[in-house]
């Protein structure tokens, strides 16, 4: 059975840490979160994974092909470079939603996110034989978004993008898929278990609800890095050809 592997990365005891011995300056917290995300993206990315910031104190990574030992190595790097530690829960399932449920539950069982006792916990399990590593990613963007950027106030376009993001989250979540905003007008969906026709239905629903046309490259491969690359290649082909296709699917 083909499964996606997700890792919940949670900063240990972060809430209390931000106010001990006194509240830390907001810009310092923002820098810490940004640099921690960048380092995690670098570490998992070099191993074929892909990290999404989510809440910044709680991040989700697609980690197919990354072993528990490699997770531990990444935790050690974080502990050496940052004034905080991170705990990780790993879950694998046929759908992204169920994988993150498993990752979350196993981490919750070993202690609260604000527990001073929990530190650098690593729990859960990776994809193992006879199951296979498999990641499907849809990389979407909004048609003609540059026209909006060049003609509308920046916060108006930002609001439109966030509305689009939320609409996609709701529609994909009903199909057990997870959606993440990637910056600009780019949005990614972890879409294991969905047919191209189902993704096309979502894009049509967004157009009907919001009047926006989206296109998508969909990639499927054993690792997140390969799936994301194939998805981006498909999206680039749609942009370059300017044909009527709204979705191109590529498989490793």
Image (cartoon, grey):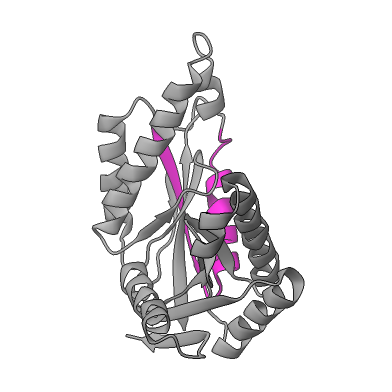
In what quadrant of the picture does the C terminus appear? bottom left
Check if residue 90 falls in the magenta segment. Answer: yes
Q: Up-down: is 214 above or below 179?
A: below
| Residue found 38% across the figure and 62% down from its top | 63
Looking at the image, how many numbered discs can be counted on the residues?
Answer: 0
Which residues fall within the magenta stretch?
85-113
Percent position of residue 31, x then y? 40, 30
Is residue 3 shown above or below 188? below
Q: Residue 201 appears in which quarter of the rendering? A: bottom right
Membership of 217 in magenta stretch: no
Residue 15, image x and y in percent?
56, 26
Residue lying at the far top in this picture: please name it. Answer: 21
- Asked whether 115 or 250 is in front, the reply is 250
* Residue drawn at (37%, 68%) of the image: 224
Q: Nearer the viewer, residue 15 or 149?
A: 149
Q: Nearer the viewer, residue 235 or 149?
A: 149
Q: Residue at x 68, y 57 (%)?
A: 163
Which residue is found at the position 62% from the left and 60% from the top?
Answer: 165
Q: Is residue 41 left or right of residue 201?
A: left
Residue 109 visible in the current orientation = no
Residue 217 percent coordinates (x, y): 44, 79
| The one of 109 and 161 positioned closer to us in this rendering | 161
Whether residue 35 can be seen here: yes
């Amino acid at each position: 059975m083909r499964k996606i592997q997700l890792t919940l990365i949670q900063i240990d005891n972060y809430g209390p840490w931000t106010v001990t011995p006194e509240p830390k300056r907001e810009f310092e917290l923002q820098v810490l979160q940004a640099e921690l995300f960048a380092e995690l993206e670098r570490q998992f990315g070099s191993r074929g994974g892909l990290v999404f910031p989510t809440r910044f104190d709680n991040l989700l990574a697609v980690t197919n092909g990354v072993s528990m030992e490699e997770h531990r190595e990444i935790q050690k790097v974080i502990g050496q470079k940052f004034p905080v530690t991170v705990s990780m829960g790993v879950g694998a399932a046929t759908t992204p939603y169920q994988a993150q449920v498993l990752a979350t539950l196993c981490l919750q069982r070993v202690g609260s996110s604000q527990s001073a006792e929990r530190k650098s916990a690593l729990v859960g399990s990776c994809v193992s034989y006879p199951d296979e590593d498999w990641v499907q990613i849809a990389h979407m963007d909004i048609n003609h978004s540059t026209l909006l950027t060049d003609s509308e106030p920046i916060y108006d376009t930002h609001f439109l993008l966030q509305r689009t993001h939320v609409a996609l989250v709701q529609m994909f979540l009903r199909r057990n898929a997870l959606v993440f905003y990637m910056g600009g007008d780019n949005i990614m969906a972890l879409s294991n278990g969905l047919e191209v026709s189902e993704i096309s239905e979502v894009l049509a629903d967004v157009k009907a609800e919001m009047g926006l046309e989206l296109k998508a490259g969909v990639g499927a491969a054993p690792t997140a890095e390969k799936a994301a690359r194939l998805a981006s290649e498909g999206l680039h082909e749609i942009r370059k050809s300017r044909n009527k296709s709204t979705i191109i699917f590529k498989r490793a």
